[in-house]
């Protein structure tokens, strides 16, 4: 088991298997944050969103705990589904009901996808809600028109009174990093192979821009992604001469400092967690399928197979 501790502050575990939890634990991941997001096909009604929110504050939190990982989430209407106005109106009524739950650390992920008028409308409404509830905001920046969307996202946050220190701008790249850091925001990078940020590129960004207000995540979901993106990138940084202290800042401490402002994301939660007991139930259900034997802490810490280090 890894001696270093990691936080993956953006990962969609609802799309992953328990094998991933086991591998993340062995690699040193202590806590994860699961932002509410688009599940891959349009939702047909707000009831499916209600079940989804209940899932990520309930069952998924329990499932992670059965592998010794502390699970938190963010609640929001994602940008793609903001374009269905009828659905969006109903979901907006659900958000305050879930945003106050104990494991919810921010409103998010919200922002732009195609930069439509409806995306902007619900982005603003959710920023205003975060301001009213004194919550952090997690901003998704678009795949297309990345720089324009990022600048406009920061303009909106500031126009509606958000303190940049309470906002995490995610999915940054070489095009956006300087502007986001200059304006005082938390600057997150997604180690997502092929489309967002590879770990080779991430090493160069840390060498050029340092570690102040920078942290990384995997955003692993149902696509081609890697839930070990954070520990693998930490390993590569160490191999490329970045100090252990700096690696800790971008893979653990800065995420803890950023989301710790919520008052619901505390190191003590995972340093002093209860022992794992996989025979426990949630709503009458266990994680054990087909009569599988409950794994112990010792079972879970046995070394796994080595994975490829480089993520292009």
Image: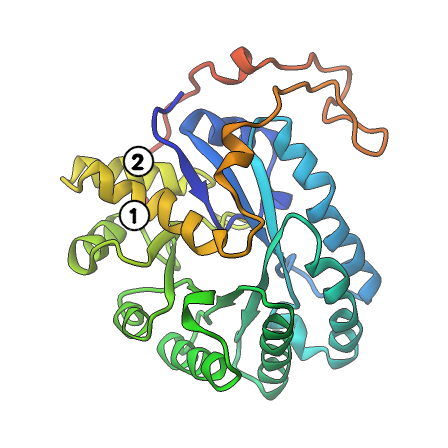
Name the residue beneath numbered marker 1.
199
Name the residue beneath numbered marker 2.
309
Taking the image as shown, residue 22 lies to the left or right of residue 64, namely left
The residue nearer to you, when weighing 291 against 237, is 237
| Residue 204 x, y percent position in the rendering | 19, 54
- Quadrant of res 125: bottom right
Residue positioned 32% across, 75% down in the render:
183
| Residue 227 x, y percent position in the rendering | 47, 40
Relative vertical location of residue 258 with respect to residue 180 in this rendering, above or below: above
Q: Is residue 191 visible?
A: no
Relative vertical location of residue 214 with respect to residue 146 in this rendering, above or below: above
| Residue 88 x, y percent position in the rendering | 73, 75
Q: CA distance from mark 2 to mark 1?
A: 9 Å
Q: Are marks 2 and 1 in contact (CB under 8 Å)?
A: yes
Mark 2: secondary structure: loop
Taking the image as shown, residue 300 lies to the left or right of residue 97, namely left
Q: Earlier in the sequence, mark 2 or mark 1?
A: 1
Q: How many marks?
A: 2
**Mark 2 closeness class: few <14, some 14–19, many ≥20 residues within 10 Å:** some
Residue positioned 35% across, 53% down in the render:
215
């Amino acid at each position: 088991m890894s001696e270093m501790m990691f936080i993956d502050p953006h990962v969609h575990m609802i799309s992953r298997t328990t094998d991933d939890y086991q591998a993340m634990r062995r690699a040193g991941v202590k806590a994860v944050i699961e932002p509410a997001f688009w599940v891959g096909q349009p939702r047909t009604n707000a009831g499916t969103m209600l079940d989804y929110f209940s899932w990520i504050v309930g069952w998924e939190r329990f499932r992670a705990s059965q592998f010794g990982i502390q699970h938190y989430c963010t609640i929001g209407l994602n940008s793609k589904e903001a374009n269905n106005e009828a659905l969006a109106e109903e979901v907006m009524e659900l958000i305050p009901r879930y945003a106050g739950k104990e494991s919810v650390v921010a409103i998010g992920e919200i922002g732009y996808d195609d930069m439509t008028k409806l995306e902007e409308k619900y982005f603003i409404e959710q920023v205003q809600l975060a301001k009213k509830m004194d919550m952090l905001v997690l901003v998704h920046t678009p795949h297309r028109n990345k720089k324009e969307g990022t600048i406009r996202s920061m303009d909106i946050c500031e126009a509606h009174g958000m303190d940049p220190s309470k906002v995490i701008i995610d999915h940054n790249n070489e095009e956006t990093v300087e502007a986001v850091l200059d304006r005082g925001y938390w600057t997150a990078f997604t180690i997502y192979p092929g489309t967002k940020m590879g770990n080779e590129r991430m090493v160069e960004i840390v060498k050029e821009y340092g570690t102040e207000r920078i942290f990384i995540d995997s955003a692993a979901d149902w696509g081609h992604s890697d839930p070990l993106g954070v520990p693998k990138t930490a390993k590569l940084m160490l191999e490329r001469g970045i100090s252990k202290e700096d690696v800790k800042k971008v893979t653990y401490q800065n995420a803890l400092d950023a989301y710790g402002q919520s008052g619901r994301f505390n190191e003590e939660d995972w340093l002093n967690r209860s022992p794992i007991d996989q025979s426990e139930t949630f709503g009458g259900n266990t994680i054990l399928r087909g009569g599988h034997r409950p794994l112990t802490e010792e079972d879970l810490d046995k070394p796994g197979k080595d994975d490829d280090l480089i993520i292009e």
